[in-house]
Image: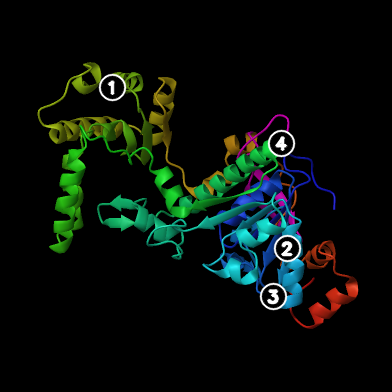
Amino acid sequence: MTLAAGPFAGLRVVEFGQYIAAPYCAQLLADGGADVIKVEPLEGDPNRRNGQIIPGESRQYLNKNRGKRSLSVNLADPEVLAAVQALVHGADIVLVNFRPGQGERLGLDYATVSAANPCIIYAENTAFGTRGPMAGALGMDMMLQAFSGVAHLSELGPQPLQDPIIDYAAGMLLAWGISTALYHRERTGEGQKINVALLQAALMLQNNHLTHVDAVDGWRTQFLEYYHQAKAERRPWSEVMAKRESMLPHVFIRSYYGFLPTGDGTLAISAGGRPMQLRLIKVLGIDDPWVTQPGWMPDDGPAHAARIYAEVTAKLAQHSAEHWARVLTEAGVPAAAVNIKDEMLDNEQAWANDFLVRLEHDVVGGHTVVAPPVQFSKSPLRAERAAPPLGRDTRSVLRDAGLDEETIDRLAAAGVVRSR
């Protein structure tokens, strides 16, 4: 098999991944030239059914599994398991999101694998980490959104985010962790185990807010006391959110950093620093001493914030979102009209920078996917091969594991391997 040149060319990855985080991580390694063998059950990764186009092929599988080889087997068969174990022992990287205890039952846990191959990098994705009262508990993105606080707190109540950002963040962290472990191995010859928990990824995504400074954040303790009491009393959610906003120490920023209504739609303004805020109020022709006078604080913060917000939105209502996006951008204020997902696949800026790529699938045909998310001048990542149909590479991978054609034919006839 000829692999595209890349930073991971020559490395073999065996992936026991399902859904998003681990498969997306492995896709990034494949984009870098690694030989990624995706071990799937006979029915395939469950994501093959999510957004299904034809039986066994879905958009959710296409966009997280390109560049891989698909090995479709029943690991309950001893002969098949022995072959897979041989693949793992000869690999550079093993990537897993096993259910609790599954790795040990299969002899594919870190202790067993590293005993056979001390140089192995064993990357594990869990929901809540490896210690504590929830170690081993199952979890998926939406559940972690709820548990971690990532869920959007709308006026109507907590709402899940449409995109599984925790899963993707965990996938990126896994790829970064593996790259770091490879660098360590290059210097020392040592393999190691790494773990990325969905909960840790969720906390990272909230890094802007999950900082408690004792001197100024006493409001948080006060609000939580109120919040737990309000839940017990079943008070309206809108009342709870209004209480929280009234207690926040920085309530002025929503006029300068957020989604605001205009004459025909919604505008995103990202004036997160004072110089940009000065430019914004100059363009809009409003006065805000919180911006113009450093150190000034109002006696009634929420009332002042409400007044400024009313003045800003009244000005914005005079023209369209596209008008304000152009005017504010020219003035040095980051601003953009809100687009919807459906528009981005035709976005000129995305195509000009090769942020999207066209691929041809063996069965589904032509399709567009998001390109590798980092661009390198010397060792580029490449999206060149579409995701594999289920079991497409079973025969070649089992040959790599040392099985002859007669044995593979026998296993296929017994229904413990799927081969196209």
Question: In front: 305, or 264?
Answer: 305
Indicate which disc, 2 or 1, sits on the residue closer to the N terminus. Answer: 2
Disc 3 to disc 1, how far (Cα)?
A: 65 Å
Q: Which residue is drawn at the image coordinates 21% and 43% (left, top)? A: 220
> Residue 197: where, in percent of width, then height?
48, 53
Rate crowding at label 4 as few (under 14), some (14 to 19) or many (20 or more) other CA atoms within 10 Å.
Answer: some
Q: Tell me, yes or no, whether the highlighted magenta stretch contains residue 366.
A: yes
Q: Of all residues shown, which one is farthest toward the bottom?
A: 414
Q: Is residue 363 visible?
A: no
The residue pinned by badge 4 equals 380
Rate crowding at label 1 as few (under 14), some (14 to 19) or many (20 or more) other CA atoms within 10 Å.
Answer: some
Viewer-side label of 3, 2: 3
Indicate which disc, 4 or 2, sits on the residue closer to the N terminus. Answer: 2
User: Which of the numbered marks, if any, corresponds to residue 74?
Assistant: 3
> Residue 235: where, in percent of width, then height?
14, 59
The residue pinned by badge 2 equals 70
> Residue 206: where, in percent of width, then height?
38, 43
Q: Which residue is drawn at the image coordinates 77% and 43% (left, top)? A: 9
Q: Which residues are magenta?
A: 353-379
Under tag 2, what secondary structure?
strand
Viewer-side label of 3, 1: 3
The residue pinned by badge 1 equals 281
Q: Is residue 76 visible?
A: yes
Image height of 18 relative to 187, above or below: below
